[in-house]
Amino acid sequence: MSVNVGILGGTGAVGQRFIQLLDGHPEFELTTITASDASAGKAYREAAKWRIDSPIPEYVGDIEVRATDPSDVPDDVDLLFSSLPSGVAADVEPKFTEAGYVVSSNSSNSRMADDVPLVIPEVNADHLNLIEVQRDERGWDGALVKNPNCSTITMVPTLAALDNFGLERVHVSTLQAVSGAGYDGVTSMEIIDNVIPHIGGEEDKMVTEPKKLLGSFDGSEIVQHDVDVAASCNRVPTLDGHLENVWAETAEEITKASAEAAFAEATTLDLPSAPDPLIEVFEDPDRPQPRLDRTIGDGMQIAVGGVQETPAGIQYNCLAHNTIRGAAGASVLNGELLVEDGWV
Ligand SMILES: NC(=O)c1ccc[n+]([C@@H]2O[C@H](COP(=O)([O-])OP(=O)(O)OC[C@H]3O[C@@H](n4cnc5c(N)ncnc54)[C@H](OP(=O)(O)O)[C@@H]3O)[C@@H](O)[C@H]2O)c1
């Protein structure tokens, strides 16, 4: 089976990751790339300032970049990935869904909208059924599905595993790589020899998105999980890979051994980009580390280590590659689920 796919905003940092991940994909054939009007009409290799450490696939370099407008995208594109700036995406994505396209989006707009599925396939695949509600309410033939923020996606699969014990409270402190801010996001003068203890909007996403992701779909809406999350987000001078220190409290007693077993047994799926296991548990207390461990499972695995009992529950460290599992890889995995479940 081959599904024709396109990328909205395919010349940017996340767009380039999409291209890397889609090259040789067993189900998806990349046929269409859009960007701003400044790039439209150019060959991809002229339009994109390529910054990924593998070459632009030959066939992609030849693709003519199109305008980000439904009238400029061929009808035979079955699935669109979106990596547009969120302000642009908020305006443009509904035009594509209205025109009948299914959009798997990485942009942050609409993630918390009541009728938009926010999905990590291994955690809440059934939330895709919210598409029925979305289509009824908005009159769309297409569909809009989001993946969460890169720091949320690093932590939530571990929280889903701990919810077997009745998850009640979570405190998290993040050490987030500079690539999460985009190429122009943080200057070298700001970040070398430094840590910035604030990332605008990030703490709010860490508090709100897990409640939706861990919630349940009751047939008409997502009933949010009542876990309390407190987050402190820090930008640190690593290139890729968000490391997070998590303290979790559960209703039932939890031990280091039972937590590690729950992590190791986390749900895995039979989808091309789904890693197995989902969570790799390290015994060595100084792992995971961004430079050593961010590419495990081709960048799609969550690494966990430093599991310890605390008076109120457990603490641990988790790590994921922020532009693969946290961005483009997350949207591709959602696309695979959309195909598997018959929405595409
Ligand atoms: N960077 C990360 O690690 C990361 C992680 C998670 C989520 N995200 C989210 O992913 C999205 C993309 O981030 P990014 O870092 O890839 O951004 P980026 O490098 O600035 O790329 C933006 C893309 O959107 C296109 N674009 C900009 N303005 C446009 C317009 N008015 N109409 C049509 N296309 C337009 C650009 O095309 P041109 O090349 O023609 O300008 C480019 O292809 C953002 O919503 C961001 O919050 C990023």
Image (cartoon, helix red, strand yellow):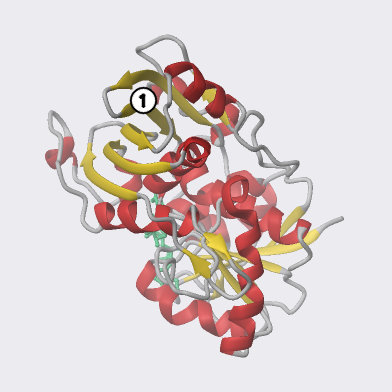
Give how far across and how far down residue 179 sits, in percent: 35, 43
Answer above or below: position of 51 versus 113: above
Give how far across and how far down residue 270 sits, in percent: 75, 41
Disc 1, SS: strand
Numbered circles on residues, count: 1
Give how far across and how far down residue 168 sits, in percent: 36, 44
Residue that numbered label 1 is attached to: 316
* Residue at 47%, 69% in the rendered image: 39
* Residue at 43%, 18% in the rendered image: 256
Q: Quadrant of residue 299?
A: top right
**Label 1, residues with CA under 10 Å away: few <14, some 14-19, many ≥20:** many
Front residue of 192/49: it is 192
Instruction: Name the residue at the bottom extreme.
Output: 139
Front residue of 128/192: it is 128
Label 1 beta carbon within 8 A of ligand 1: no
Left or right of 326? Residue 1 is right
Q: Quadrant of the N terminus?
A: bottom right
Q: Is residue 32 visible?
A: no
Q: Is residue 127 visible?
A: yes
* Residue at 50%, 22% in the rendered image: 258
Give how far across and how far down residue 170 sits, in percent: 32, 41
Answer above or below: position of 29 versus 274: below
Q: Quadrant of the C terminus?
A: bottom right
Front residue of 71/97: it is 97
Instruction: Name the residue at the top extreme.
Output: 284
Name the kind of residue labelled 1 in the image.
Tyr
Quarter for ligand 1?
A: bottom left
Q: Quadrant of residue 176?
A: top left
Q: Quadrant of residue 220?
A: bottom right
